[in-house]
Image (spheres, rainbow, N blue to C red):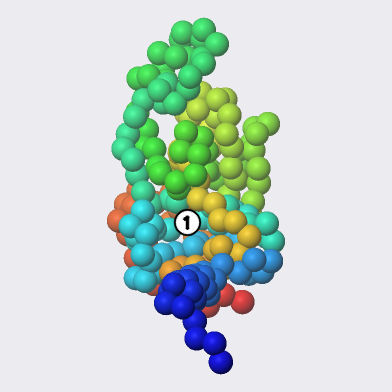
Amino acid sequence: MKKLSPYIFLIFLFNLCISAQALGESKNYFKGKFYSSIKNNFLVATDKMRDPKFKNTVVVMLDNDESGAFGLVINKPLGSIPLGSLIKKLENQNSKKNKLYNIKIPVYWGGPVNVNKIFILHSKEYESKSTRKFKDVSLSSDYKILFEIADKKGPKKSLIIMGYSGWGDGQLEGEMEREHWTLSKLDVDLIFKKDNSKKWLNAIKNSFIRL
């Protein structure tokens, strides 16, 4: 039997290590598979979450299917800023512009994807042309709702959120298999609770196993 040269043997070991690493990472990614119970629940970071951005995070999961998942973090405030600073073009409506700049409102970090995109997560009694209705909440993303929030004619409850959390096909399912996330029943009152420090504690306490 012919012996392998040291050079070829090193290449063999290198490829073996790469293959082993890929197999280990595959546990975090299940392409073509998804858990139908994720949608319309809280996705809650566990103590095993390794990404510091998502430590003690609560995400409202709005969509999940074979192509991926979409949700908004609801317990990571960025601070209070003037409403007018969220709008680049105010169509020369000076009175509305001044009113918006005089009103400060808490803005939340919704996730690391498209951080300049603004979403308004709100109670279901309000509706505009951009509104998407989900099981327990609605989502809007137009200037009109900001004007109406300034006029106190907007939704009864709302969060202004910048950016979103998104996962590719099977990516979130893989992270859940590694116990980085758990599910908890969506609680509308908890979403809009002013004390953000208690959102994660309440959500993790009510967590359950996916179906």
- Residue type at the position of mark 1: Val
Can residue 130 be seen in this snapshot? Answer: yes
Q: Nearer the viewer, residue 69 or 81?
A: 69
Residue 67 point in image, percent of width and height: 68, 57
What residue is rendered at 49% in x and 81% in y?
Answer: 4
Q: Is residue 189 above or below residue 37?
A: above
Q: Is residue 104 above or below residue 121?
A: above
Question: Mark 1 falls on what kind of element?
Answer: strand
In which image quadrant can residue 180 be found? bottom left
Q: Which residue is mark 1?
A: 59
Say which quadrant the N terminus sits in.
Answer: bottom right
In which image quadrant can residue 140 be found? top right
Q: Residue furthest front?
A: 2
Residue 161 point in image, percent of width and height: 46, 40
Q: Nearer the viewer, residue 89 or 185?
A: 89
Residue 17 point in image, percent of width and height: 45, 74
Say how many tags the image has: 1
Q: Nearer the viewer, residue 43 or 168?
A: 168
